[in-house]
Amino acid sequence: MPKTNTTKNRVALVTGGASGIGLATCEMLLAKGWKVAILDRDEKALKAVRAAHEQNKAVRIASLDVTDEKAVDRAVAETVEAFGGINGVVNSAGIAADKHVFDTPVDLFRKMLDVNVVGTFLVGRAVARIMMDTGGGAIVNIASISGLRGSKGRSAYGASKGAVVTLTQVMANDLAPFGIRVNAVAPGPVETPLVQAVHTDADRELYHRYIPMKRYGTPAELASVIHFLLDDTQSSYVTGEILAADGGYRGSGLVLDR
Ligand code: NAD
């Protein structure tokens, strides 16, 4: 049974690691003894993370745009050089927009695919090339419930996350022979800067109506699920899985008031 990240040298690379779900995941992994490369394109957010981890030798912080293939390959090589390998990846870098299909410019659609899908592919592929020679590992992509159901106003975002779901399943299939597991988490609404920028008060009321648990998730709740999928001591036989962490939204039918 492949158990590549059960050893002392557990190293994770987290994109979008300076904010929201990615940041909460970095904090949880560090608390559990992992070394973590925190990558993000937001310099301001990275500065705050740097200040919080100034003396921490288990942390490597660097600027990265996940859509830049050469920069991705470089960031992966630098992480391997610093920490001696990589056996966990979290693709949390992502952007979102809520727009009716008529109001969705093609540039926005292309940008959404570039960051959410191409970025996830580039990082996963670069790290898998390392993992295949070092005994395997686990990749966790962050999809969305909007990639599983047709949420209104999410033609670009939903299509990009639907593609992340399929990419996850295909990569799980391609990479299983190399001891690399690939899974995705499909969050419902989670209280992060991304959601705070996009959700109106009316949106929040609607979400509460349709989510059986009647609340948003927290970044820490998502980090737990991501950690489960990363950790070979817990999920060594799980691959190609899309795990919804959504307060019951995906599985729910009628939400009656009684
Ligand atoms: P967030 O905005 O707090 O964090 C996303 C991070 O990704 C930011 O720090 C941003 O700078 C970074 N990023 C964006 N584009 C990048 C790029 N090209 N290269 C590198 N970094 C980049 O958002 P979040 O809510 O934590 O979202 C994390 C992931 O979870 C995203 O993929 C998002 O689509 C997904 N998601 C979030 C929710 C939610 O409700 N918050 C729900 C479903 C899915």
Image (spheres, rainbow, N blue to C red):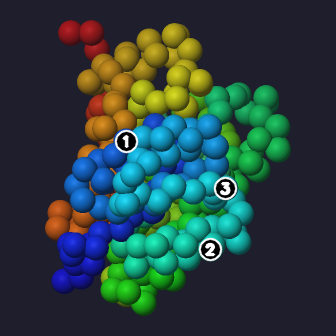
Q: Which picture quadrant has residue 12?
A: bottom left
Q: Is mark 1 within 8 Å of ligand 1?
A: yes
Relative to residue 135, is residue 219 depicted above or below?
A: above
Q: Is mark 3 within 8 Å of ligand 1?
A: yes
Residue 24: numbered disc? 1
Q: How far is disc 2 from disc 3 in space, using C-alphas?
A: 11 Å
Q: Dot 1 surroundings within 10 Å: few (below 14), some, or many (20 or more)?
A: many
Q: Is residue 41 visible?
A: yes
Q: Earlier in the sequence, mark 2 or mark 3?
A: 3
Q: Earlier in the sequence, mark 3 or mark 1?
A: 1
At x 74% / y 48%, what residue is drawn? 111
Q: Which residue is mark 2?
A: 73
Relative to residue 251, is residue 76 depicted above or below?
A: below
Q: Is residue 26 left or right of residue 228?
A: right
Q: Residue 164's x, y, as percent?
A: 53, 57
Three-letter code, disc 3: Asp
Q: Secondary structure at mark 2?
A: helix
Q: How far is disc 3 from disc 1 in space, using C-alphas?
A: 20 Å
Three-letter code, disc 2: Asp
Q: Viewer-proximal residue, 146 or 191? A: 191
Q: Which residue is mark 3?
A: 65
Q: Viewer-proximal residue, 145 or 92? A: 92
Q: Where does the N terminus fall, quadrant-wise?
A: bottom left
At x 51% / y 37%, what residue is drawn? 48
Q: Is residue 193 left or right of residue 186?
A: right
Three-letter code, disc 1: Ala
Q: Dot 2 surroundings within 10 Å: few (below 14), some, or many (20 or more)?
A: some
Q: Residue 90's x, y, as percent?
A: 44, 58
At x 25% / y 50%, what residue is drawn? 31
CB atoms of marks 3 and 1 within 8 Å: no
